[in-house]
Amino acid sequence: MHTELGSQIKKVLVIGLGQLGLPVAKYVKERGFETFGYDINTLKMEEAENNYGIKRIERFDDIDVFILCVSTHDPNDEYTPFVDGLFSLAQKISREAKNGSLVSIESTIPKGTSKKIFELLNHRLHVAHAPHRWYALEEDEHGVNQVRVIGGVSDCCLKIALQFYDSGNESLDSNDNITNDSHESCRRNSLEIPMHPVSEIEIAELTKIIENADRYMQIAFSEDLYLYCQANNVNFGELRDALNTKWNVNILEPRDGVGGHCLPKDTKMFLQSSKSIKSKILMAALEVDEDYRRFREMRGYRLVPSAINSHK
Ligand SMILES: NC(=O)c1ccc[n+]([C@@H]2O[C@H](COP(=O)([O-])OP(=O)(O)OC[C@H]3O[C@@H](n4cnc5c(N)ncnc54)[C@H](O)[C@@H]3O)[C@@H](O)[C@H]2O)c1
């Protein structure tokens, strides 16, 4: 496969125009690319088309870059990982896309998924994974263009993807495969998002799910402390304030428990990523969250909608 695509990228298709995909499509369009959208939900497609000028497309023949932002949870259980939708999309791309285009997976996925998608594409397209850190409640600060990790199935996949996302990245060797002229035109053809490249695509897959597992654990520890305080007649708020006066301590508020569906789903993705060894501390964190929720329920607390309580 060639690595000259970077300077020639014109048409970008964002697949999945939900909470994450719509801001991504808007950002790509603002950067000057001809931006298309595709979503199985016609309302989402209409919203993107009518309100933001994202062009509707049904066939994928002429696309240079595919950005996949579809959901990765079971439609019947939002806490359970599910990538079948992503795989059926890969089959459609495989049937219709031209050789050498870039497929960038921005959805959160289990370890090993990117290489399976590369197989489904019959090795004809470049595959990269650039997981998101986008946060709905602080879009200005933690939106589409914050620093992100990126990996490629092979070196040329990573190189093409870096040219698209971050043409100024130091890992791009200007003497390798692209001329200075095409380097300049790459810069104009870039999303200019600061990227942190990694050598194996599995590292990129793991960073996203471990980031969220880490957050899960921090919340679970605050739930654990809260339950301890309840059982031992200690004022949790006062204890937390006192603890957090130390420079390297940051005890969170337990609020309504681990909120949103992403933290539980992604923590499960991480736990399922190893057959031989499972993180004991995370298994315990899942149990603590259940205990905490049961405690809240017994006390008659109402559950707050998950997005409000998503703890980032
Ligand atoms: N929303 C966030 O804050 C956030 C942050 C980081 C990562 N993520 C990850 O991004 C991915 C998308 O999350 P989201 O919150 O935007 O989900 P969402 O449910 O809001 O949107 C997903 C969209 O994908 C569409 N879709 C599903 N299957 C499809 C298919 N086969 N073809 C075309 N369209 C399809 C759905 O109709 C929906 O509009 C998930 O993997 C999630 O874990 C989300």
Image: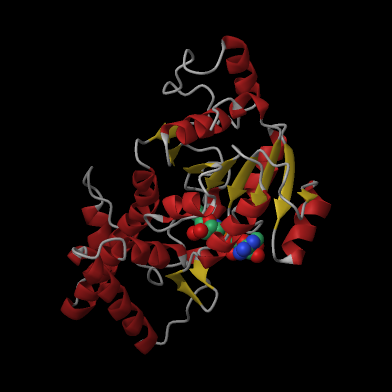
Residue 97: x and y in percent read 66, 46
Q: Is residue 218 above or below residue 54?
A: below
x then y, percent, for residue 303: 47, 78
Q: Is residue 102 left or right of residue 260?
A: right
Residue 174 vs 253, above or below: the answer is: above
**Which of these two is toward me, 9 or 245?**
9
* Residue 206: percent from left, percent from top: 35, 51
**Looking at the image, which residue is at 47% across and 12% down?**
175
Question: In the rendered image, which quarter contains the C terminus?
Answer: bottom left
Between 292 and 161, the one nearer to me in the picture = 161
Q: Quadrant of residue 9?
A: top right
Residue at 77%, 47% (x, y): give it.
Answer: 54
Colouring of the image:
secondary structure
Q: Position of residue 20 (x, y in %)?
A: 59, 53
Q: Is residue 37 left or right of residue 232?
A: right
Taking 271 as reference, is 294 above or below it? Answer: below
Total labels: the figure holds: 0
